[in-house]
Amino acid sequence: MRGRAGGAGATKAAGGGGAAREAAAAKAASGGAECEAAAAKAAGSGAAREAAAAKAAGSGAAREAGSAKAARSGGAGATKAASGGGAAANKAGSAKAAGSGAARETAAAKAPPSAAQWGSVCAALQKWREGLQGGEGGAGRPPEPSVTTIAERYQGDPWAVLASTILSLRTKDEVTLEASKRLLEKAPGPRELAEIPESQVAALAYPAGFYRNKAASLKKIAGILLERHGGKVPADMGELLALPGVGRKTANLVLIEAFGLPAICVDIHVHRISNRCGWLSSKTPDETEAILREILPKKYWKGLNALLVLYGQRLCRPVSPRCSLCVIAAQCMRAGVERSR
């Protein structure tokens, strides 16, 4: 019985083993089919890769052809560009050289006078001034600017110089002289002016330009001088500029005429003539003063205003200057002059 059971078990085991082998074989066959499918897929991928490679090769060939064409076109364009660029560069270089030459000529023409040339200019102006006989058709000494005349008459009194300088702004010399005399007769110092009503100061200043504004400034100045400076006019640019109605022109003129200090008073005549002659290039009188301080020898500072003011009134006028009579023509560029006599 155990023999039959063993045989049956062996038979079953054998049968089970065969089934297992059949299943394994089927699985292997299935695996083979999967391998074949994978191989086919790989083959397909390979074919795709070959097609892609062929396409890439075609694109590469196209690119090579394009590159060859571009190289030919680029070579021709580069040759043309190089030729054109060279010509343009040569032309630009020539223009730049010409421009540089013009700039050098302009710079040379605008170079400020040397010390010797300044001396010649001032000597020529002084000689011309001394040759005047009290003006055209007159007799006696040449007319002095109104403030200079007041300074001489009042022996350089700082208050007289300051008051007349304020009255002189935008006012003719003859009017300034008369107004200054009237004012200084009533108010020879800041204390006396402080005691006069502003309306009376204005009446004394009339008909000077902006006489009401000037009267108000003089009243304020008198008060400040009494309060801060012991009733005296300061001999300092900063202190003078701190006074109402006092600008650089007024301050410089006070320093020159009242204290004999080196300063440059720049009014419309000095500003105009300095630019017209090409000694400098500026937009405002203050800018002109700053440049003159750098290029004009100090020994000519004080006298420049008196020389150029009279010259600007008589010959170097704003419109149609009398260039045919100019005594400093050798040092004048006639900048901006369109018509002259």
Image (spheres, helix red, strand yellow):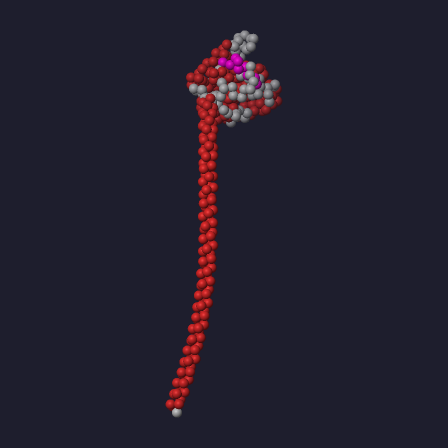
- Residue 96 can be seen, yes or no: no
Nearer to the camera, 21 or 58: 58
Nearer to the camera, 74 or 124: 74
Q: Residue at the spot x=53%, y=21% of the render?
A: 336
Of all residues, the one furthest to the top in this rendering is 139
Of all residues, the one furthest to the bottom in this rendering is 1
- Start and end of the magenta stretch? 319-327
What is the magenta segment's predominant secondary structure? Answer: loop
Q: Residue at the spot x=47%, y=49% of the render?
A: 62
Q: Residue at the spot x=45%, y=37% of the render?
A: 79
Whether residue 251 is in magenta: the answer is: no
Q: Is residue 293 above or below residue 139?
A: below
Q: Is residue 21 left or right of residue 153?
A: left
Is the N terminus in the top left, top right, bottom left or bottom right quadrant? Answer: bottom left
Q: Residue at the spot x=48%, y=19% of the render?
A: 256
Q: Is residue 281 left or right of residue 207?
A: left
